Image (cartoon, grey):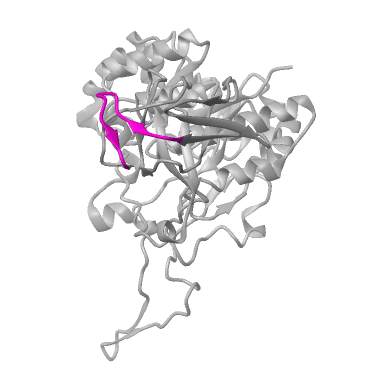
Amino acid sequence: MNRVELLSPAGNLEKLKIAIDYGADAVYGGVSHFSLRIRSGKEFDLRSFQEGIEYAHTRGKKVYVTINGFPFNSQLSLLEKHIEQMAALQPDAFIVATAGVLALAHKIAPQIPLHLSTQANVMNLLDAEIYYHMGARRIIVAREISLKDLKIIKNHLPGLELEVFVHGSMCFAYSGRCLISTLQSGRVPNRGSCANDCRFPYELYAANSETGTLFRLEEDPGVGTYIMNSKDLNLASHIDEILESGCVDSLKIEGRTKTSYYAAITAKTYRRAIDDYYRGVSDPGAYQTELESLQNRGYTDAYLINRPFEKHDTQSLDFTIALGTHQVSGMVCEDGEHFLCKYKTLPHEAMEIVAPESAEIEPVDNDIGTVTYQNGTYTITFKQLKAQNGKVWDAVHSGNTNPIVLPLKLPQYTFFRIPSTEEMCTAPKK
């Protein structure tokens, strides 16, 4: 049996390492403006991206390079050079969005497998077959496709790998085909610089061209202020159904510009859900509990399981994003002996430890602090907050960049978290 792949976003080198450490089989990311996430593309340079590929390959994992922007004629020579540079790093695949770029990449680097981006909007067998014969080894299907249609494609093209999104932001438009950001701010979505204008609240007006009058429409709270704001995709409770179909080769998580904690929790949760399926068990409640700890716009299972006309809960009407059930307090440094504060840390305040599933943690009690284990959860409490330079702090806040000594060695990128409070929830939303 071929096990399904878990594919996570890699917005920078740290997130790449975190996704792999927390269970991803493969990651995707890119360098430069030819990637559809310019912000994350700027966080990588050739050297750090190569380091990420080496980190993944050393651990038996894969890296897919995003070259899924829509180039202009004036950029074609730059694109050719970029493909050559990326191929020299020996990634495991290129993700491209257009037939022209697919053909160009195959010509320049025929040894690199080609994956077709969801931006190509493949919804049916006809389109899948054309791209397959052009050389696409895998197609990342449109988010609007159904599991039924995926089965049809797989039955006719068993050699074609199919990848589906299972978690992350949803676009109000048809798989990213949107011009609202372009019209309002000049930032082109299909060139990687979307301003997410669909997330803004809007006021609605009615105009009468004959009289020149303009009326502001009053709206009831929660009815339509955020008229284009989609909820976030969350299919963790449907992993069994998706894998049972036998037509999906890779489960993809969206979110290269999201936090390191997001990279960890999504990879860990979906890794557990996938492994549970192969063990013959399932615990959707536990998966959702973890995913609710993340900032989100509300969750929806969208269209893979249900058709669009059957869904009436995909829109978040009264907020753009809400704080999750937990706040990250700290993250363990790469040396495993110190942590950096991400919110605030106080002596004698218990924090939950979130580490990769493979982590082996021993309870301790010493001058620095204690680590305890109860009901499946590890908790850390500091007796003193001693910095690497020897200074002892009464409290540590997120602006403090001094590494703080741990009472024991922990896996790199282990997180400490506390339940969100009302004060955190009423903070300005991003």
Q: Quadrant of the C terminus?
A: bottom left
In the rendered image, residue 391 lying in the magenta stretch gets the answer yes
Q: Where is residue 283, by image quadrant?
A: top right
What segment is highlighted magenta in the picture? 382-394
Q: Main secondary structure of the magenta part?
A: loop
Q: Is residue 22 above or below residue 90?
A: below
Q: Does the image show residue 379?
A: yes
The residue located at (45%, 36%) in the rendering is 261
Extreme residue in the right direction: 280
Report if residue 240 lies within the magenta region. no
* Residue 114 in the image, given as x and y percentages of width and height: 47, 20
Comparing 410 with 65, the one in front is 410
- Foreground residue among 271 and 348: 348
Residue at the spot x=67%, y=42% of the render?
286
Farthest residue, direction bottom: 211
User: Toward the viewer: 424 or 106?
Assistant: 424
> Which residue of the protein is positioned furthest toward the front in this rendering?
367
